[in-house]
Amino acid sequence: MLNRKELASYIKTSLARGKSKEEIYKNLLNEGCSVDAIQEGFDVVTSEREREDTSKRTIRIIVTFGAVLVGVGIFSFIAANWQAMAKSVKIFIIIAAMLASYAAGWQLKEKMNFSKTGGALILLGTIIYGGGIFLVAQMFHIRAHWPDGFILWMIGAVAVAYALESYPVFYLAILVGSVAIFGHPFALLREFGFHSFLLTSSLLLFVATITTFLIGWAMRKKVPPELREFY
């Protein structure tokens, strides 16, 4: 007869091995455990998982916010010394900072199993990439609609999110893409004048982007907790 702690440990281990709830119930009943005791064990495991999920979510938010602050700090430093820097130095700083963030993030996430810290650095690299697009455009006086920069940022972010399986970068791509889609018609209207088609088509694209994100989020919520790390 298993005590409460042993019962919860057995259930947790069995679930991790892919056993169904019915199989676990059957095995424990054969060992003489009561239905109430088994259900209590499942309740303990569920409670532990909820606490772990909350802790992981909090850590993810903290490291993501930290990455954003570091990115802001980098661009603040560059902006403060922008006029005094040569163009080659500016480009080198942008590329070096981006590659260093990606390399360190990949190393921490894939090789050292620090997934949250690594993911935050990958997100930082994507933020630097996006900021670099606008800084380079300003540096060389490239004439283009400002939403085009967000479109390029979104494309790069989606590629990184897919290659490195980073959900924070994917969410950033959704946000950046939404800004581009929503802002593009206003940039066109300012140059070519009002045309309802421009506003309507961009609005539909914006709605489609948000709808796609919500559907993906809803589908992921249906994935069992033990399998979410693979999706």
Image (cartoon, rainbow, N blue to C red):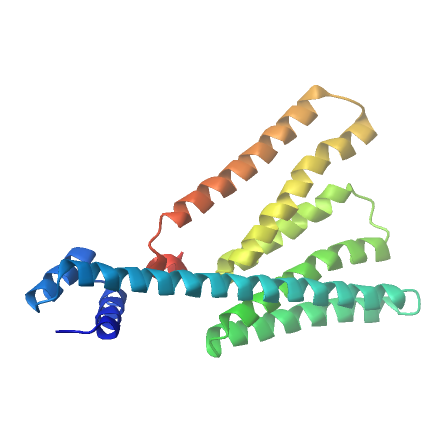
In the image, 99 versus 62, the foreground residue is 62
In the image, 134 versus 167, the foreground residue is 167
In the image, 68 versus 179, the foreground residue is 68
Q: Residue at x 73, y 42 (%)?
A: 147
Position above or below: 223 against 4: above
Q: Residue at x 61, y 52 (%)?
A: 172
Position in image of residue 87 (x %, y %): 85, 66
Position above or below: 121 against 142: below
Describe residue 82's horizontal placement relative to residue 112 as left or right.
Answer: right
Position in image of residue 47 (x %, y %): 36, 61
Q: Quadrant of residue 88?
A: bottom right
Position above or below: 201 against 179: above
Quadrant location of the C terminus? bottom left
**Quick one: which residue is furthest to the right in this view?**
84
Q: Quadrant of residue 59?
A: bottom right
Position above or below: 102 against 126: below
Q: Residue at x 60, y 67 (%)?
A: 63
Q: Quadrant of residue 199?
A: top right
Position in image of residue 229 (x %, y %): 40, 61
In the image, 41 versus 60, the foreground residue is 41
Quadrant location of the N terminus? bottom left
Position in image of residue 21 (x %, y %): 20, 57
Q: Residue at x 63, y 44 (%)?
A: 177
